[in-house]
Amino acid sequence: MTDLIQLTTHELWIDGRQMAITVSKPNSTTIRLTWNLPNPIQAYAGAVVLLSEHKFSATNFPVDAVRYSASTNWAAPADRIDGAHVVAAFYGFFGDDTTQTTVDVTNVDPNKLYYASVHAASSILQYHTIGSQSYPLESSRIEKASETYAGSIPASTVTPENPVNGQVYFDPSTNKVMVWNDQMSAWIQSNQSTIPVGAAVPINKNQLFFNTSDQQLKFFDGSGWQLVSSSNCRVKMGSTWAPAGGVSVSAAYPQSPMIGDFAYVTIPAALSAPPTAELKFFSLGSWFLPTASLVQILVGGVWTPIVVGQDLFGATDPAVPAIGDFFYQTSSRDLLLWNSSEWVKADTENEGSATTDKVGIGSDGSYDERLRLIKILKHQLGWPNVCVELTEEQFNVAIDNALDTFRQLADNAYAHRHVSFTIKQGQSLYYLNDPRDRTDRIVNVIKIHRINQLGISSLSAETGLYAQAFFNQLYQGSNVDVLSIHLMNQLSETYEKIFAGNLMFTWDEASRQLTVLRRINQAQERVVLEVVMERTEQELMLDRWCKQWIQGWAQSELWEMLGEARSKYGTLPGANGGITLNGEALLTRSAEQQTELKRQITDLEVGNGGVNWGNSSILIG
């Protein structure tokens, strides 16, 4: 007779504690849950995976001897345990695949915070009731009330399903930003040129515009410019509407206008005022500026209020953007994208989140390195031989504080990089938040390096003639040697100062705005940005030069938490007399360790060799 091995609940819990679950987002409405299997396996024969909008408690634990049904569609749940959705449930006893380690949950709310938990199950439907919880996937709108920090373009390695017109996503595997277009029923690659900026979009659907060159009044219907006529435009006339009339151009308003007539009037310059121009329409004895409440156009069979754009008139019609063109609106701090008929918001992910908290920038979304560090810290505190009265949330707080402190004090918490960039004529404000060239990772801009020499360019309208003569005289083939090159480099620095070759600028990390404090008159100029970029927390926790420091600081934070709790009572009554707690000793040890760790950075034992922030920026430490 073969001996049967009896497995206990303890062995199931050993398996369950080895499991860890990670939360990530392939796209804004999908959550991917990934977990590991225990090794070696003793009692594990399946699992139940839960997803919830709230932190887990005892009311969410699965009940022994109950077989649960799962659904991966958040909008159509199967079994629920006190609000927590069962998104995966598989049992070896029923022939399910017990090697499953991932599940995608669809139709989740992109603006909510989600928690996940995995509970190991035995062959007799016993559960590791406490389960292993995830580090919660942060939501910018729930935990970050501030809208100071700009959002990001949603990132996904999987093409989104059921897209809407103008939906945009960044694919890291191809380094492309794709836009869905309903007319073509296809994903189109977006424009990658320098993003234009302005307080208002250059063109908008239903925009009214008078072309002073061809003297035609037009409106933009979303696809092209249409001529205004009495059949497609009307003006307010008291409580009714009157059809639009013609347009006159003169230096004064007409003496006998008809209701609905428009007039473009150029007012000559006076001694005390420059020349001006106005576009107005006539109704009930007065001239009015065209506004949304006073003028309507017929679009798609529906009378629609006009939109007044940046300019009501001009010599050329505002250019119609191509599908996938971007525009940064400074008044609302929004990155907009043209979807073939209107502007839609593109930076919809991670709004309000600081750079360090953004998935894909300050974190890659995985939890493996953090879980490994938590296990190390638990063992350093004496677990499992000693009860450590700290929650997993407190361990995460300690690690967060360690990372934030290291980023504040150490230079190798960041990466020193150079980015090629194009500055354009007449544009002084630039929006640096593009995942394709990694400008979305920029924390600080050290310097703008101009590629031309001596602070001048032979292609510049400002210094073209002078530059050509200067270069011809200095760069003769017979005069080039090593000493000449060395002297020219020194001379270049002098001329950069004399001719203002260096570009002064300001940088705002939160809004991602780079302001060049100089007007560029040439068509465009290629420059190199010397920048400081964010490194993910996963990089830092694996870096041989800083992982021990982060571990040490997190340990000191945990000592402080334990010390605060244990110092509330000096002693506790016990069976053999009083029990003395070590709260004060832990607080002292925590302070001493933090002082030592700060000394290591001050003495360049840790954190050296990362970023040289340059003479023009602040010192760290």
Image (tube, rainbow, N blue to C red):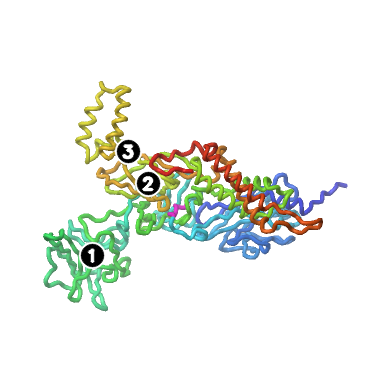
Q: Which residue is mark 2?
A: 192
In the rendered image of this protein, does residue 468 appear above or below residue 193? Answer: above
Q: Assess whether residue 547 is covered by the magenta stretch.
A: no
Is disc 1 surrounded by few (<14), some (14 to 19) or many (20+) residues within 10 Å?
many
**Residue 233, position as x, y percentages in the image:** 25, 68
Which label sits on residue 372? none
Which label sits on residue 450? 3
- At mark 1, the secondary structure is loop
Alpha carbons under labels 3 and 2: distance apart = 21 Å
Residue lying at 59% horizontally and 57% vertically, measured from the top left: 115
Q: Residue furthest bottom?
A: 239
Main secondary structure type of the part rendered in magenta: loop
Q: Please, what is the three-letter code of the amino acid marked with disc 3?
A: Arg
If you read the primary sequence from the N terminus, does the residue marked by circle 3 or circle 2 appear first?
A: 2
- Label 3 with label 2: CB-CB less than 8 Å: no
Magenta stretch bounds: 149-154
Judged left or right of residue 48, residue 43 is right
**Residue 277, position as x, y percentages in the image:** 18, 61
Alpha carbons under labels 1 and 2: distance apart = 35 Å
Q: Is residue 80 visible?
A: yes
Q: Please, what is the three-letter code of the amino acid marked with disc 2?
A: Gln
Please state which of the two labelled residues, at mark 3 or mark 2, is closer to the viewer. Answer: 3
Q: Assess whether residue 151 is covered by the magenta stretch.
A: yes
Which label sits on residue 228? 1
